[in-house]
Amino acid sequence: MRLAITLMCLAVAAACADLLDGPPPAPAPLISSEPGTSLSENEKKASRLRSLELRCASPSVVRCISFDYPDQFRDLSWWAVGDQQGRGSMGLIKNNEHDLMPQRDCTVAINGCSLKFTIPSRSGAGASGSWFANFSDDFSVRFGEGEEFYVQWRQRFSPEFLKARFSGGGWKQAIIGEGDSPAYAPDGKVIWSCTQLELVVVNNHFRGYPQMYHSCGGKDNQYEGLYLYQAIDYRPEEWMTFQVRVKIGTWYKNDRNYHRDSEVELWVAREGERSRRAVFTEGYDLANTKPGAKYGKLWLLPYNTGKDSSINHSIGYTWYDEVIISRAPIPDP
């Protein structure tokens, strides 16, 4: 069927775009202007602010993060809080004392401030640090069998970041993983980024477009790539939009008893455009053998497994803004 649609599209490509992409994951933007309308900078700023407010106002939204406030940037690294490392609803983490810390940037942002990462020359895999957020302050919002949720964020890339000749396996954008349990039950431990049920958005092998994989080596002892629907290239100096949809079926227990009742999608949009499907995996199995474990934590980070700290390259930057977590599809900005 897809082949037939593709052949038809060779003749009428523009008209067939929706047939190939399928329906968008969310309604149209809540803020729009008439074609050809010219807006002042103040009108554009007000429109951007209103767009975030409207998207976050939905009763289905469980968390909305603007990066405009200092308490969204708490340093929860060992060197700042000792044995309270990572304990909080959201914050910053660096792996080593002399690594860089992500920053609050109020000069490059959609509106207000953003989360900025710097990727320095001659740096290791995690030298830029990371930022995390549980899906709720009290850790009560977590998703398990039979549930569905959506994660949307905006991200901007410097030209140097996209062009740099890094070593390693490719930089990550986001990890959606196991959330901390209320009161850190049952063992009092913080949940870190590498978990069995995780879903990762990554520029795998620096191909120049987002891909996804499932599990930190914990599904049948592998990192399992998800089906790439179409390659949507990263673009520099614009605020791209990414939205992940996760429909959880029956947890797979690494027992070769596959249920094939889960789905994962990634949708990507260039600034000012509608989103397009990039990853689509249906009839899938999400692995989870840990009692009580559920999705409930988002990590943002440019971590690049295997990056060689002896290699010189241009300094790169990436920024994040407007994180929304919801029980229902989130409209495009």
Image (cartoon, rainbow, N blue to C red):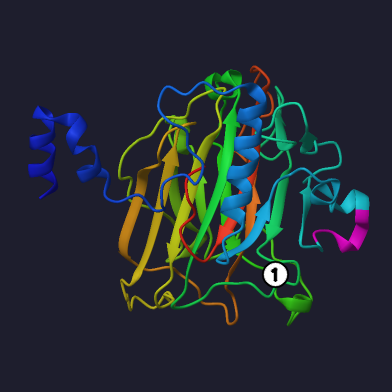
Q: Does 34 appear above or below 224? A: above
Q: At 68% from the left edge and 20% from the top edge, which residue is drawn?
A: 315
Q: Residue 85 in magenta?
A: yes
Q: Does 59 appear above or below 54? A: below
Q: At 79% from the left edge and 37% from the top edge, which residue is drawn?
A: 104
Where is residue 92 shown, x and y percent of the image? 78, 48
Q: What is the magenta range?
A: 81-86
Q: Main secondary structure of the magenta part?
A: helix
Q: At 57% from the left edge and 19% from the top edge, which residue is drawn?
A: 159
Quick one: 244 or 304, which is closer to the camera? 244
In the displayed structure image, the side of residue 14 where residue 139 appears, left or right: right
Q: Residue 188 in magenta?
A: no
Query: From where the camera sits, is residue 302 visible?
Result: no
What residue would you read off at disc 1?
A: 180
- The amino acid on which the numbered mark 1 sits, given as a three-letter code, is Asp
Quarter location, residue 239: top right
